[in-house]
Amino acid sequence: MNKQLQHYWELAIDKIVLFAPRLIGAALILWIGFKIIAKIVQFVEGILKRMNISDTMRPFLLSILSVILKVAIIFTVVSVLGADLSGLVAIVAAVSFAIGMSLQGSLGNFASGILILFLKPYQVSDWIQIDDKFGKVEEIGIFSTVVSTPGNKTLIIPNSKITDDVVTNYSKRGVVRLELLVSMPYAEDFPRVKQIIEKAIAPVDKILKDPQPEIGINNFDSHNIEIVVRPYVAPDDFWEVTFEAHRRIKNAFSENQIKMAYSEGVELGTIGR
């Protein structure tokens, strides 16, 4: 019995002597490697700040870099301990493939989010329109963009839809041109109607004086002439000025007895206040 215990003891000592240098080396690699990774991440963070990478994107990129470097250190440690990496690599590859297949849509949104954060087609607080969705950007995430509409609705738009569609940024140049359509009867004089409209919208203080509002004939309809009124406003005043300008133009037409063709097209009638 004593001989058997002595045999196991000697075997344990041999294994310890054999693996002790590897264990010590692996521990040193792990400790020094993580210290170096922290310095690298700190250095890259400074570079990203100088590149004006957004606060949303910067932590994400740094975490990705940190994970990749730490995985590389762990693989190195496992290799130093003498383990066979081929099986581990195969398992990691299979798991990554399965995850990638199950998250195709999310990965598309993720890639689009990176493009948006780098290219910056819009920023937080910008007024944008995507397809028929119009609103103010509240948050730009990795997978989606949060937009608040003038009706106080919150839209969560997948980033892949944004990069695949046309995005209209109303805040890029700091001003927005409204497109207000007004009907005028054929019998009416356009110079007179134009003067009425100019006088009606002049008191709206949120309409910019420079550039000046544009008023012109846009189209000839079967019953009326379509006039387009294009005042310029700040993006945040888009809807307020739209409603106020329409109200004032309607009142001005009523006061000046401008007649309209009703939808039946059989008679002209006055416009009420």
Image (spheres, helix red, strand yellow):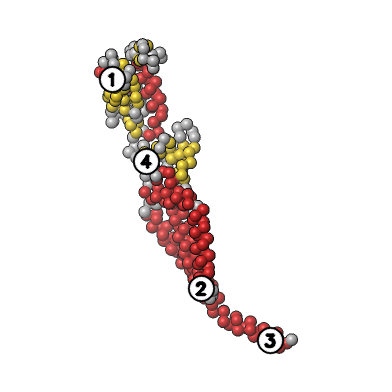
Q: Earlier in the sequence, mark 4 or mark 3?
A: 3
Mark 3 lies on residue = 6
Nearest to viewer (mark 2 / mark 1): 2
Three-letter residue code for mark 2 = Ser
Judged by depth in the image, the label closer to the viewer, 2 or 3, is 2
Determine the CA span between mark 2 and mark 3.
Answer: 32 Å
Q: Position of residue 174 (x, y in %)?
A: 34, 37
Which residue in the protein does label 2 denote? 79
Residue at figure coordinates x 26%, y 15% from the top left: 189
How far is disc 2 from disc 1 in space, using C-alphas? 82 Å
Q: Is residue 200 above or below residue 91?
A: above
Question: Mark 4 sits on what residue?
Answer: 166
Residue at the spot 38% in from the left edge and 40% down from the top edge = 167
| Residue behind mark 1 | 194
Which comes sooner in the sequence, label 3 or label 1? Answer: 3
Q: Secondary structure at mark 2?
A: helix
* Position of 165 relative to 183 (above/below): below
Kind of element beneath mark 1:
helix
Instruction: Say which label, 4 or 1, has the lower sequence index.
Output: 4
Instruction: Kindly report the distance in space between the C-alpha atoms of the residues bearing marks 4 and 1.
Output: 34 Å
